[in-house]
Structures are given as C-alpha cells and as structure tokens.
Amino acid sequence: MESITIKDVARLCGVGVSTVSRAMNNHPDINQETKEKIMQVIRDYNYVPNNSARNLKRTDARTIAVLIKGITNPFFSRMIKVFEEEIQKKKYSFVLQHVDNKQDEVDVAIELEKEKRLNGIVFLGGFFSHSEEKLKQIPVPFVLSTIGLVGTADKDEYASVSVDDVKESYKMTDYLIKSGHKRIAIICADNDDESIGKLRLEGYKMALHDNGIELDESIVCPMKEELDGYSMENGYAVTKELLESGKEFTVIYAISDSVAIGACRAIVDAGKKVPQDYSVAGFDGLDLGTYYNPSLTTIRQPVKEMAEATIKILFDLIKKKPAENHRIFEGELIQGESVRKLN
Amino acid sequence: MESITIKDVARLCGVGVSTVSRAMNNHPDINQETKEKIMQVIRDYNYVPNNSARNLKRTDARTIAVLIKGITNPFFSRMIKVFEEEIQKKKYSFVLQHVDNKQDEVDVAIELEKEKRLNGIVFLGGFFSHSEEKLKQIPVPFVLSTIGLVGTADKDEYASVSVDDVKESYKMTDYLIKSGHKRIAIICADNDDESIGKLRLEGYKMALHDNGIELDESIVCPMKEELDGYSMENGYAVTKELLESGKEFTVIYAISDSVAIGACRAIVDAGKKVPQDYSVAGFDGLDLGTYYNPSLTTIRQPVKEMAEATIKILFDLIKKKPAENHRIFEGELIQGESVRKLN
DNA sequence: TTGTAGGCGTTATCAT
DNA sequence: ATGATAACGCCTACAA
C-alpha cells in the first residue's frame, strides 16, 4: 500500500505541485475551478499530506501544545476541555501531549516545539523546579498552569496560573480548627515532593501554628511511595494504617479529593462513620466529591476560569501584548457533609 | 533563539554530518573517541534533533500509537498504563494521541501513520462503524480495544479485544432479577448510540425477556444528550427526573460506574437510601466503585489482561505471526453493597 | 572510520 | 493564476 504524494496528485491533475499546495492550504491566488478539480482528485485518491514534511517546511503551524503530566488526574480532564475550546476559538490547532513520569517535561517541550513548530505551550501538572537556563531553552511562550512552583527560577522567566496552595491549605486547616477540630491528621505528599504537596503541607502547618496548636508529626502521614501518588488506593492504605495505629485524631485532611475518598472508605471499612466518628476533608473540588456520599468538604479550584486565564496569557505573550503574567486564583471552601462541627 | 542543526554540530566538531548522525543513533562503525566528543558538543550546545526531519526520512520508527477517544474516561487510564509498559518492554516507543469528539479516528490514524511512520495502532474507545473501504486505508496493523463493534465490516478487516457487552449486560440484569428485582430501570445511551450503549441495552432486554418480565419502556432512560455522556452529572440528572416522575422501580442499572454514582447521589439527595430504598448497579469495575459508599455492584472488565492481549495481538500482526484476532474476555460480577436482595 | 551528496514530501520564492 | 526550484533537517548509500 504505497502512499501517494503531492507530486502524484499534481501529475494526475496535470498541474504543478505548488498549485496543489495552494489548493490544500486555501491560498488566495488560485483559480476556483482548478482548485475544485484538485480537491476532487485528492478525495478520490485518498491523498493525505505528510505532516512531517509540512512541519519541516512550515514556519508557523498555528499550533499550541498542552503538555500534561499525569493524564490520569481527573482534575486535568476538565481543564483540557476548556483549553481545547479556547484554542479552537482562536483558530489554532491543539496538540495534547502526554508526558510520563520519567520524562522531563521541558525536554519534551523543546523537542516538540522543533517537531511541530509550536507557537506556544501550556504545562499542566507535575513538579517544576527547573533552572532558568533550562527554561530559557524553550523558544516559544509558555504558561505553567496549576503547577505549584517551588523553584528558585526568576519570575520573569515564565508565566503562571494557579491558586495559592499555601493560602488555600491554610484556609481549609483554619476552617477545620474553627469547626472545633484540634487533632487534625493530614495525608500529604512524600518527603521529596517539591511541589503542591509541599505547599499544602506548609499551609497546614502555618494554620496550626497561628491557632496555637502544636504540630504532631505522628499524625502527619505521607502517601505511600510504592503506590500511585494522589490515588484513592493510596488514601485508603494510609488511612487504614493510621486507624490501626490507634493515634488520636478527629479529622483527616487529605491533600486531594481522590485521596480523601480513599480515606472515607477506609473509615467505613473499619466500621466507623464519616463524619460522625471521623471527619474528612479534601482538596481540588472534583465533581466526584459532590457526588460522593457523604459529599466532600474541600477547596474548589475555579477550573474554568483558570484554564481560560491560561490561554489568555499565552496568547497575550504570543501577540506580545503586555500582560499580567502571574495570575493567582482564589479557591472556594466547599462545605460538604464530610466534616462534622464539634462546637 | 535560532535553533542549531546537525550541520552546526558537525562544523563545531570538525566532522561530517553523517558522523554526527551515527553518534546520535548508536551506529556501530564509529570511533568511540569521536563519538564522545560529538556527544559532548551536543550536550554543551543543547542540540535537539528535529523529529519531523527524522520521520520524513525514516522508514521504520519502531513506534506504536494509541488513539483514544474520550481521554476523560477513567476506565482508559488504567489501560493506557499497561499499554505504555508493554510497548516499552518491546523496545518500541509509544505515542498517545487524543482524538476529539468531532474527529474521525480513522482519519487521524491515517494521518498519524504518515507523519510518524507507525508500526501499529491501537484504537481505544469511541464508536466504530467504519466501512471496510475506510479500514483498508490504514496501512499498518491495528487493534480495536474495548470498542463495541456494531458495524457491518468484515471480521477479517480488523482485530479486536473486548468483553461481550451483550452477554455481560445480560449477566448483570439476570443477577438483579435473581436477586428479586422485577422493576429494573436502566440508564442507557441515547438512541443514536451505535456502540457499547446499544449492546448493553440489548443484553438488558434479552435478560428481561428470558425471565418472562415485560419490558417497560417508561423506565428505560436514555442519558441526556445535552450533558456529557457517561458522566456522573448525567446519571444524576436522569435519576432525579426518574424519581420525580413517580415511576415504580426497585433498582437502577446504569450503563457505567460513573453514571451509577450520579444515580446514587440523586437517590440520597431525594432523601432515600441505597440500597434500602433503591438498589443501584453499574458497569466497568472502576476503582471508584469499590471506594464509593456504598460500594458498587458492577461488572468488572479485566482491564490488565485486555490491555496485554491488545498489545500481544498487535505485535503478532506486526510480526506476521498467525494469531487469534478477536479476543473476547469474560467480565466478573462484583457484588458490592449497592444492590439489595429482595428475596 | 569518515565525508559527500541525494532525497524524504512539503511549502515558499521567484519567475513566467 | 501557475510552475519550476530551492530550501527545511535529517538519514543513508556510496565513495574515499
């Protein structure tokens, strides 16, 4: 099954290759009749142009790539949808590129930019502690979306959209304390986490401190490294262990909704009830949390607005408009059924 | 920020381009010293080869693409992980390509094969009622994985891995009936669904018939077209309407676990209990179902085995080994807490 | 072991 | 409005 090329089409139509190219790419200066004849032949022979050759030659592909680390994360699905819509609105095309755990997202970005002649890049998820030097190698505008920045890189080197993870985590912890909880267990990221995990833990610690509650390291529970991060399974396993340890606590604050749901189930399986025996709080504001039983108390990130802002900033950068390059959104505390007021 | 090319590297090293190429691609006949010198320059100057140029020239890229329709579906996340592992085991590289709702997956496949010189393709999700003629245009081996085939295409034209959706749906419905339920509402796909939705509905009808229960169309509830298909939101909305209609039923059988969870929540919000007032059953066997409260009665598809079989068949086709091209897996009925026995 | 040159399938430039 | 031709950046004979 040999593939047919633009030359074949040209020959079949009795025209030159450039005319065929013009027909395909909606160039203005081409006769309508010849164009139609060419398009007909293309259809008849199922000619499909080779993208590699196109990309090689093209200077501007009008394409935005979204690089996503952890495609499994339901939090991202909703964002992707918005990205797709917004990018199409601008008449750009959209490439979704999955980055696996072992890959360096910046390397992938650099490679992909070369390959596809990208106009811009959105990074979604993952850690981000790259050196300035590394970031400078990305030759097109890019935005870090919902990525907890811990790095030391200069703020001028990148644009970003996120919530203030420290502050929101503080907000949740403070709310739990104000609801009468004093023994607040947290399921957090493992120790080498350099990203949102670290930030959210920090917010937790600050809130405890400001409320005069001493930090008890024995109820600070990192996720299990041998299991998937931020998964229900992980939340379940950690909670089970915590319950069996006999440590005292009245609420579990989990670093994400998925983890929180695992925690809820572990409590139920231990013959206890949420929130009567133990309260549980999450973070993210997934749909799932509102449909869970009991519905989850959590911090909802304004996903749609954040995704829209991401694209807006990216296009401002592409068009070289002056823009606000770091947008911090406010999370919303959702009072679900999973937290009991003790006072 | 002009990009550096292989020629620049060659010049910087004082060698020819082919030597640089050999160094990068681990060709045997190259002096170890020159190779190291070249690799050092490549690192120093952050040279990244252009994939489009590579693909254009290459005849065999040792690459498998997985085309996935509905990246949002948590059911697929687990499969993707297995695909990735299995493909890497074979020393092939792996491209995950998202296909949006408006795109035709076969068109995307054909285009991508040209662009990346693919060796094989896995189709995941979506409908599949393409003509034989269309399928013949795919110039490399491919496998349809967990796709409900309704089409008329010749079985010889494609390979597939799936469960028997009719049979599994029959199994579930029959189980519900044997548990004493006679008024079984179903939340199914909308009427123009030509895929698993249709098949699962068919199994439901057959089971009713075989058990001498008359089909009541008024409790056959298609998902709402204006909402996302197979979503919790959809399950919630449909169930709410069903409850408010006053129709009589003792169990809701939802066409997927996500929909089932939406249904559970709608029941809870109506002040009723699952399974005391109404039972709920799902389909798929997502993690989520086991962590939900109550845990979901559902049909678990053997995800791992199915994904492995998909890759095995694909590589058998690539290597032109004789192979079993249509593997049907058996689903497992998971008895969760969401269905009450009435007898 | 290494270098030179041709070609992969397009698009862009420049004539015509 | 159209056609010839030179890139695009890489790989791979083939020659040295």
Image (cartoon, coloured by chain):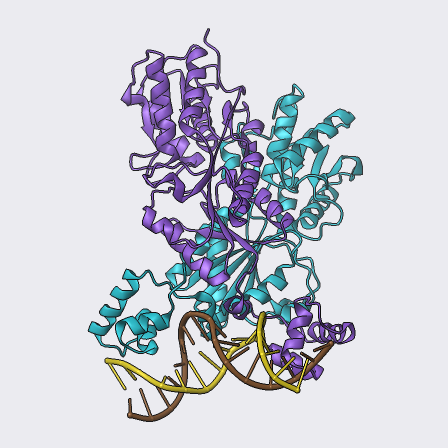
Chain colours: A cyan, B purple, C brown, D yellow
Q: Quadrant of residue A214?
A: top right
Of residue B343 and residue D14, the one placed in the foreground of this image is D14
Residue B215 in picture, x, y percent from top left: 29, 18
Work out whether B301 lies above or below A322. Answer: above
Residue B192 in picture, x, y percent from top left: 29, 37
Q: Is residue B4 visible?
A: no
Of residue A232 and residue B214, the one placed in the foreground of this image is B214
Residue A277 in picture, x, y percent from top left: 65, 23
Residue at position x 74%, y 73% in the image: B35
Describe residue A207's horizontal placement relative to residue B130 as left or right: right
Describe residue B139's horizontal placement relative to residue B5 as left or right: left
Q: Quadrant of residue A20?
A: bottom left
Residue at position x 66%, y 71% in the image: B22
Q: Quadrant of the N terminus of chain B?
A: bottom right
Residue A292 in picture, x, y percent from top left: 52, 31
Of residue B72 and residue A326, the one placed in the foreground of this image is B72
Q: Residue furthest left?
A: A33
Residue at position x 46%, y 26% in the image: B282
Describe residue C2's horizontal placement relative to residue B113 as left or right: right
Q: Is residue A130 visible?
A: yes
